Amino acid sequence: MRNPVIALLLLALFTVGEVPVCASQQPSQAAAPASVESVTAPFIGDWAGVLEYRDFQSDARVQLPTWLSVRPASDSNSVALTYTYDDGPTKTVIEKSTVSIDSALKRYTVTSDRDHSTDSYQVEGLENLAAKHRGVLVLSGSGTENDKKVDVRITITVGRNLYKFVKETRLPSQDFLFRDGYTFTRRDPPATSPPH
């Protein structure tokens, strides 16, 4: 049976409300929107690391070994993510989702394969990530946590071999608090150049 803490955490990860887009918002006139391939390329591959989350009842931080596979999806505007969680001595939990990015609207959308829910965030930092193949994305939206509406902020940092994801939430008029996060390194070490 699925660990209820994992189920609750995964629900929290994917329970995010739609972010309204004003009709007056227009893509920047200064530069063309980044291509989806240039934004998603730094994430493609196999990753290993740790999921850390704040337990709803004890407020303690819990860590689980986690593996992540990121592949281009059949839809050229998306990537498929497969998370594998070590959930005990002989049990693993697998969760899949698809991420689509609309760089013109600065929209980052997650669709869960588990329940087919789709959640959307406003995203900043796409152009820099596309240009340098490393950088920081900041996602913002709203969601529900313990049956209460919360603001959601997610910070994704990607480097050549490091990928960090930090989700923070806050109740109205309060500060953002850590909810959960991942720290991954690429599963295989980078190729090294032979000595000269």
Image: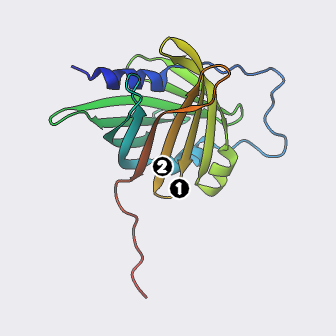
Please indicate whether residue 123 sits to the left or right of residue 5 in the image.
Answer: right
Please indicate whether residue 7 sits to the left or right of residue 19 in the image.
Answer: left
The location of residue 22, given as percent across then percent down, is 78, 21
Q: Residue at x 46, y 23 (%)?
A: 12
Query: What amino acid type is highlighted by mark number 1?
Result: Gly
- Classify mark 1: helix, strand or loop: loop
The location of residue 73, given as percent across then percent down, is 45, 35
Query: What amino acid type is highlighted by mark number 2?
Result: Tyr
Q: Residue at x 35, y 29 (%)?
A: 95
The location of residue 124, given as percent across then percent down, is 68, 39
Classify mark 1: residues with Cα within 10 Å, few (<14), some (14-19) or many (20+).
some
Please indicate whether residue 107 sits to the left or right of residue 79 in the image.
Answer: right
Do the residues bearing badges 1 and 2 touch, measured as CB atoms within 8 Å? Answer: yes
**Residues at marks 1 and 2, CA–CA distance in whole angstroms:** 6 Å
Q: Residue at x 60, y 41 (%)?
A: 36
- Classify mark 2: helix, strand or loop: strand
In this view, the residue in front, 73 or 150, is 150
In this view, the residue in front, 93 or 196, is 93
115, above or below 191, in the image: above
The location of residue 130, given as percent across then percent down, is 63, 50
Q: Is residue 113 in sight in this rendering?
A: no
Q: Which residue is mark 2?
A: 163
Which mark is drawn over residue 112? none
Q: Which residue is mark 1?
A: 159
Task: Name the quadrant of the C terminus.
Answer: bottom left
Task: Name the quadrant of the N terminus.
Answer: top left
